[in-house]
Image (cartoon, rainbow, N blue to C red):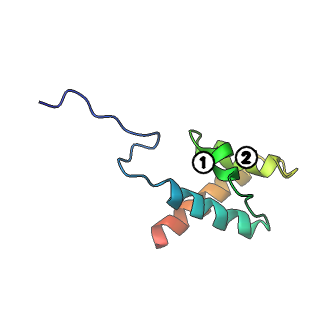
């Protein structure tokens, strides 16, 4: 009998981190930014997309408000749904 099921941070049982990284890279590219090697893992793992994007943008001197972050997250969702 199964007594417990363990999920990762986003509730998915597969390793989908590379997919999220690719989507974040696409969004950053539209912002004329590029991830440094290993930067995604350092800044993003274990954090929400909102915090991830906020930290990545802040590390490049860009301070954005919640409305703009929401717009970027909606772009990520739109890209996800189109694939």
Residue 19 tag number: none
Q: Quadrant of the N terminus?
A: top left
How far separated are the C-alphas under marks 1 and 2? 8 Å
Residue 53 x %, y %: 69, 50
Residue 24 x %, y %: 63, 59
Disc 1 residue crowd, few under 14, some 14–19, many 20+, Cα 10 Å: some
Q: Secondary structure at mark 1?
A: helix
**For the point 37% across and 52% down, which residue is it?**
14
Residue 58 x %, y %: 81, 47
The residue sitting at the left extreme is 1
Quarter residue 44 falls in? top right
Whichever of labels 1 and 2 marks the residue nearer the N terminus, that label is 1
Establish if 31 lies above or below 67: below
The residue sitting at the bottom extreme is 82
The residue closer to the viewer here, 82 or 46, is 46
Q: Secondary structure at mark 2?
A: helix
Establish if 24 lies above or below 64: below
Residue 8 x %, y %: 42, 40
Residue 49 tag number: 1
**For the point 88% across and 50% down, which residue is it?**
61
Q: How many marks?
A: 2
Q: Is residue 66 visible?
A: no
The residue closer to the viewer here, 53 or 66, is 53
Disc 2 residue crowd, few under 14, some 14–19, many 20+, Cα 10 Å: some
1 and 2 marks in contact (CB < 8 Å) = no
**For the point 83% across and 47% down, which residue is it?**
63
Residue at mark 2: 54
**For the point 39% across and 43% down, which residue is it?**
11
Q: In screen coordinates, is 3 left or right of 9?
A: left
Q: Is residue 28 visible?
A: yes
Q: In screen coordinates, is 67 left or right of 10?
A: right
The residue sitting at the right extreme is 61
């Amino acid at each position: 009998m199964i007594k417990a099921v363990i999920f990762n941070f986003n509730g998915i049982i597969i390793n989908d981190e590379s997919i999220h990284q690719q989507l974040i890279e696409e969004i950053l590219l539209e912002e004329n930014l590029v991830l440094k090697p290993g930067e995604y893992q350092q800044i993003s793992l274990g954090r929400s997309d909102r915090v991830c994007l906020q930290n990545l943008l802040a590390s490049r001197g860009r301070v954005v408000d919640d409305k703009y972050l929401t717009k970027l997250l909606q772009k990520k969702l739109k890209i996800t749904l189109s694939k």
